[in-house]
Amino acid sequence: MSTLSIVLLIILAALVVLMIVLYFWSKKLQKRQDESREKMEQTKQTVSMLIIDKKMLPVKSSGLPQAAIDQTPKYLRRSKLPIVKARCQGKIMTFIADSKVYPVIPVRKEVKATISGLYIMDVRAIRGQLEAPPKKRKWYEKLRRKAEETVSSSSSSSKGKKKK
């Protein structure tokens, strides 16, 4: 066998081992997440709150209690979290919102939120309906729209000019 084929076989074996390790690790993390979801479902409560502000902030500058910051894993300390400041039960508190709920949360409006500790799991409007955030356009849709605008603007500018 040539050295190239030996190197390729070693790389292939390493990739197979890596895929197997990632599969079992993801199963373990999924099980852990399911357990934490179950605990959160048991302790959830519905509260009315007035949303003051919402931002994506790093954990250190989020304004969360020091105990919550200390419990976050080291690899997540530099990532940004969806932080919501709200007046709840007469106190201004800082909450962490679910990533699926965060875009729907209205600012300066009163909502009924399902919370578990400092975590906002669900949000419902008290008066009216919550506005869905605008759907993000994909890059090729943006490009197509710009091309159509330039074509329409160039055709409208050529109509306005008189030919001699």
Image (cartoon, helix red, strand yellow):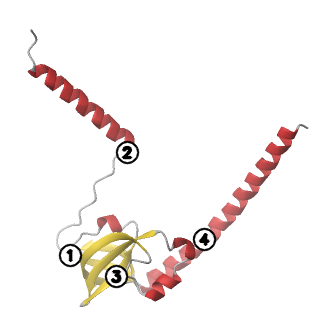
Q: Which mark is residue 138?
A: 2
Q: Residues within 10 Å of mark 1 (few under 14, many from 20)?
A: some
Answer with left or right where residue 30 lies relative to residue 67.
Answer: right
Which comes sooner in the sequence, label 2 or label 1? 1
Callout 4 touching callout 3 (CB < 8 Å): no
Q: Residue at x 31, y 73 (%)?
A: 123
Circle 4 sits in a helix, a strand or a loop, which is it?
A: helix
Q: Residues within 10 Å of mark 2 (few under 14, many from 20)?
A: few
Viewer-nearest of discs 1 and 4: 4
Give the alpha-carbon distance from disc 3 to disc 1, as whole Å.
20 Å
Viewer-nearest of discs 4 and 3: 3
Which quarter of the rendered picture does the C terminus lie within? top left
Q: Percent x, y for residue 34?
A: 54, 74
Answer with left or right where residue 16 lies relative to residue 137.
Answer: right
Which comes sooner in the sequence, label 1 or label 4? 4
Q: Which of these two is toward me, 43 or 102?
A: 102
Circle 1 sits in a helix, a strand or a loop, which is it?
A: loop
Viewer-nearest of discs 2 and 1: 2
Tell which residue pokes out farthest to the top in this image.
164
Q: Amino acid at mark 1?
A: Ile
Q: Residues within 10 Å of mark 4 (few under 14, many from 20)?
A: few
The residue that mark 4 highlights is: 29
Viewer-nearest of discs 3 and 2: 3
Give the alpha-carbon distance from disc 4 to disc 2, as whole Å.
31 Å
Q: Residue at x 51, y 84 (%)?
A: 70
Q: Amino acid at mark 4?
A: Leu
Answer with left or right where residue 136 lies relative to residue 29.
Answer: left
Q: Which mark is residue 126?
A: 1
Viewer-nearest of discs 4 and 2: 2
Q: Amino acid at mark 2?
A: Lys
Q: Percent x, y for residue 152?
A: 20, 28
Q: Which mark is residue 94?
A: 3
